[in-house]
Image (tube, rainbow, N blue to C red):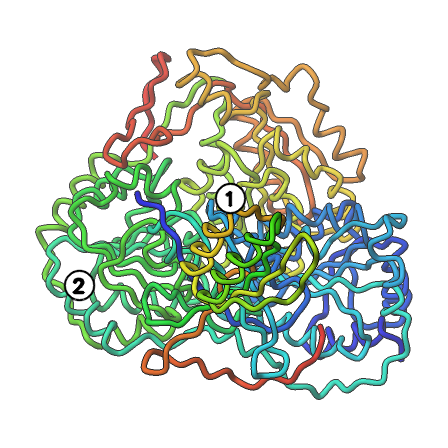
């Protein structure tokens, strides 16, 4: 059996406990959640989440069906089956040891269209958006200068327009 | 009106007339409201028993079972009962009290994270924080529990919510955009299923727990097509055991005919079952030559374990009649000749070791009731014996913990079934091991004078464990011996105010069984039976269905008596 990475969009009702249920299902079948992002969608009371998970391909379909069974889950899309666009946001603090480094770091950042969001004497904080490959490449470039700390949002994904579009049913937003 | 009264009113509006439960601090407002309510409350002696009783109430009647428990230990005691109901797809609504919302998360007295704990063992659960949500939550709970694939739903109600003034409305619409069970089978899939069945030379139908609500449709389908019918442990009664087309139970302790049919068939029509490992044995050796048509209301069951060549997601009550419409009587005479030959070669039989064996006791109970009763079982050897020798002919009359295999289920289940089907006799077939896991319910039995006969097949050991240790652990009997410290069950019954009988031999058994059953009163009969009796046939765990151990391997020379 082969293990792989899967990007899944799960649209959920904005109810307490819904993420725990989803995470529990992944864990029970041996899936590791690599990243998870969750926030309000265009529909009040509905959140869109993107999970990047690692696990057996053969089990994924079963996990997807189990997710669909959760009462507060409205829709599940496995992006390996449809074209999608995805982005990630990273904040990365890079050490600045010399004035030469500063110039070089800023030059590389410009090539990556990374924005400076904080400037200090010995460090710069960049905001980088893009796909995963771009994030990894930028991290590699900065490694030599010294990465003080970084945080990534994890991938967020939407199906492309010609692919399955996700129209959400309207729900009355009420807490249980 | 307070939240607690709103809860009871909402339950009433869903037709609830009986609740099984146990009070405690955090659910006091509900019990106070119950004092003036027309809802009948059955006081169980342990919350687990309340959950099992509610579960069996549903299984016996098709009406949602309801149980109450308090916070903390009361709620955690429900967990085994909820997991049992979840595994066997039983519609239960459990209501638990919780500490006041201001105290949640503070490790308050009798606080537990019930919402978190019960998530994995329920179909859905709720923590209600706003009193006005009560009618909607109750409506959703009943809807979720009883539709699609049924299952338990828990409502956790903090004490301050129970006490708060209710200003909401009872005329509410449920609002569940993520919950839309597929009831109607896809027309194309039904047609494909019909084609596959028509093309088969050796088809067999397997009916599971989903058949309990669709027994008329199963019968009509079987009658029209002439297909052989296997009923799983959960499907017993969904198709009557005595019918000529019935092959009995499949799997680990199934009949030779059913298991041979599975191995040799070229098509399985699975109806409302989930191909549990106790049914399939080693998956790679399960029905190696068969196309699989799988009808189930839960899409997650399709191709979970056994790959379905033709999946049909839908309710059996919708799909089976439509499938029958597409089919005529199947031309499978050769297949039937083979099946009938196996049936003739392997009738139910066992050794009548002196002085008494479990299997003959179960047959005596079957004869004395004429099968016209509800059977509940505990879990173990006696459960398998009962499945084969006390198969009921009506749906919702064989009530057993199949998926979770919960010892302690049978006695409270008998109580739940007795409330669900008033006036009908109930026989609980138990072992001396599992009956002690909820033996305190003899008090509930006494109090309500239910027509439940508890038949304890007392072999002085944990029989199923003993069987495995004898067969697979070189007779290294580890921690199975009960006889040196079992209570005198007849005296115990008497201590609870019930009639109790100790029976040591078959002559007494033959006399006592019909006598006690004729009384229609609660009673306990303690049958001392042969210790080393084993359940055969048997497929060892992990082996294939074709690797079944058929015969009774006892060295005893007592002649085998055909049933």
B299 or B198: nearer the viewer: B299
Residue at (34, 49) in percent of width and height? B305
Residue at mark 2: chain = B
B213 or B514: nearer the viewer: B213
Residue that badge 2 annotates? B197
Residue A127 placement (x, y as % from top left) = 57, 65
Residue B392 placement (x, y as % from top left) = 44, 51
Closer to the N terminus: mark 1 or mark 2? Answer: 2
Residue at (25, 72) in percent of width and height? B189
Residue that badge 1 annotates? B368
Residue at (19, 70) in percent of width and height? B192
Q: Which quadrant of the view contains residue B269?
A: bottom left
Discs 1 and 2 share one subunit: yes
A23 or B142: nearer the viewer: A23
Whether residue B164 is visible, yes or no, is yes
Residue at (70, 55) in percent of width and height? A121
Secondary element under disc 1, as helix, strand or loop, is helix
Asked if residue B465 lies left or right of residue B128, the reply is: left
**Mark number, residue B240:** none
Secondary element under disc 2, as helix, strand or loop, is helix
Tell me whether circle 1 and circle 2 mark residues in contact (CB < 8 Å).
no
Whether residue B58 is visible, yes or no, is no
Instruction: Using the numbered discs, state the Cα–Cα distance from disc 1 to disc 2 in whole angstroms.
Output: 40 Å
Residue at mark 1: chain = B
Camera-side mark, 1 or 2: 2
């Amino acid at each position: 059996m082969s293990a792989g990475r899967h990007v899944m969009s799960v649209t959920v009702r904005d109810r307490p406990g819904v993420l725990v249920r989803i995470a529990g299902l992944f864990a029970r079948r041996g899936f590791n959640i690599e990243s998870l992002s969750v926030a309000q969608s265009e529909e009040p009371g509905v959140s869109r989440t993107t999970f990047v998970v690692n696990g057996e391909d053969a089990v994924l379909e079963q996990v997807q069906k189990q997710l669909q069974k959760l009462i507060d889950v409205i829709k599940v899309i496995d992006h390996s089956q449809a074209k999608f666009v995805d982005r990630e946001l990273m904040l990365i603090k890079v050490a600045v040891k010399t004035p030469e480094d500063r110039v070089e770091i800023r030059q590389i950042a410009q090539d990556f269209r990374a924005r400076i969001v904080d400037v200090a004497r010995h460090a710069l904080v960049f905001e980088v958006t893009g796909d995963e490959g771009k994030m990894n490449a930028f991290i590699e470039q900065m490694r030599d200068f010294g990465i003080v700390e970084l945080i990534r949002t994890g991938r967020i994904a939407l199906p492309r327009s010609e692919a399955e579009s996700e129209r959400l049913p309207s729900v009355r937003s009420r807490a249980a | 009106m307070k939240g607690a009264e709103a809860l009871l009113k909402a339950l009433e509006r869903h037709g609830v007339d009986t609740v099984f439960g146990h009070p405690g601090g955090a659910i006091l407002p509900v019990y106070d409201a119950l004092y003036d309510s027309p809802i009948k409350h059955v006081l169980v002696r342990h919350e687990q028993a309340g959950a099992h009783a509610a579960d069996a109430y549903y299984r016996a009647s098709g009406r949602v079972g309801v149980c109450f428990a308090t916070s903390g230990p009361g709620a955690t005691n429900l967990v085994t009962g909820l997991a049992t109901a979840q595994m066997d797809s039983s519609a239960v609504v459990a209501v638990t009290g919780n500490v006041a919302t201001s105290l949640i998360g503070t490790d308050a007295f009798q606080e537990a994270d019930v919402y978190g704990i019960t998530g994995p063992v329920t179909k859905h659960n709720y923590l209600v924080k706003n009193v006005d949500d009560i009618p909607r939550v109750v409506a959703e709970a009943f809807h979720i529990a009883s539709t699609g694939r049924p299952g338990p739903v828990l409502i956790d109600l903090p004490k301050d919510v129970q006490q708060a003034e209710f200003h909401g409305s009872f005329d509410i619409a449920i609002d569940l955009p993520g919950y839309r069970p597929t009831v109607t089978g896809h027309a194309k899939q039904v047609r494909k299923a019909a084609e596959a069945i028509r093309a088969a030379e050796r088809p067999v139908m397997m009916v599971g727990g989903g058949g309990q609500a669709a027994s008329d449709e199963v019968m009509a389908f079987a009658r029209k097509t002439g297909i052989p019918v296997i009923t799983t442990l959960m499907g017993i009664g969904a198709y009557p055991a005595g019918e000529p087309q019935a092959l009995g139970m499949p799997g680990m302790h199934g009949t030779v005919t059913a298991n041979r049919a599975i191995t040799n068939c070229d098509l399985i029509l699975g109806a409302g079952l989930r191909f549990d490992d106790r049914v399939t044995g080693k998956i790679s050796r399960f029905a190696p030559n068969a196309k699989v048509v799988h009808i189930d209301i839960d899409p997650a069951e399709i191709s979970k374990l056994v790959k379905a060549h033709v999946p049909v997601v839908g309710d059996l009550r919708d799909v089976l009649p439509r499938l029958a419409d597409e089919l005529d009587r199947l031309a499978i005479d050769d297949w039937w000749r083979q099946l009938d030959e196996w049936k003739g070669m392997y009738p139910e039989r066992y050794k009548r070791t002196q002085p008494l064996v479990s299997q003959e006791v179960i047959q005596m109970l079957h004869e004395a009731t004429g099968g016209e009763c509800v059977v509940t079982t505990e879990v173990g050897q006696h459960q398998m014996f009962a499945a084969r020798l006390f198969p009921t002919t009506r749906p919702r009359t064989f009530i057993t913990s199949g998926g979770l295999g919960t010892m302690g289920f049978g006695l409270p289940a008998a109580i739940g079934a007795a409330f669900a089907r008033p006036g009908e006799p109930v026989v609980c077939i138990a072992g001396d091991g599992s009956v002690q896991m909820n033996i305190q319910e003899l008090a509930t039995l006494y109090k309500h004078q239910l027509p439940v006969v508890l038949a304890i097949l007392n072999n002085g050991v944990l029989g199923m464990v003993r069987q495995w240790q004898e067969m697979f652990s070189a007779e290294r009997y580890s921690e199975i011996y009960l006889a040196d410290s079992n209570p005198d069950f007849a005296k115990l019954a008497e201590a609870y105010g019930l009639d109790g009988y100790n029976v040591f031999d078959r002559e007494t058994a033959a006399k006592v069984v019909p006598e006690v059953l004729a009384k229609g009163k609660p009673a306990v009969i303690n049958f001392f039976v042969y210790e080393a009796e084993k359940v055969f046939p048997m497929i060892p765990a992990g082996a294939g269905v074709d690797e079944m151990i058929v015969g009774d391997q006892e060295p005893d020379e007592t002649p085998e008596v055909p049933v």
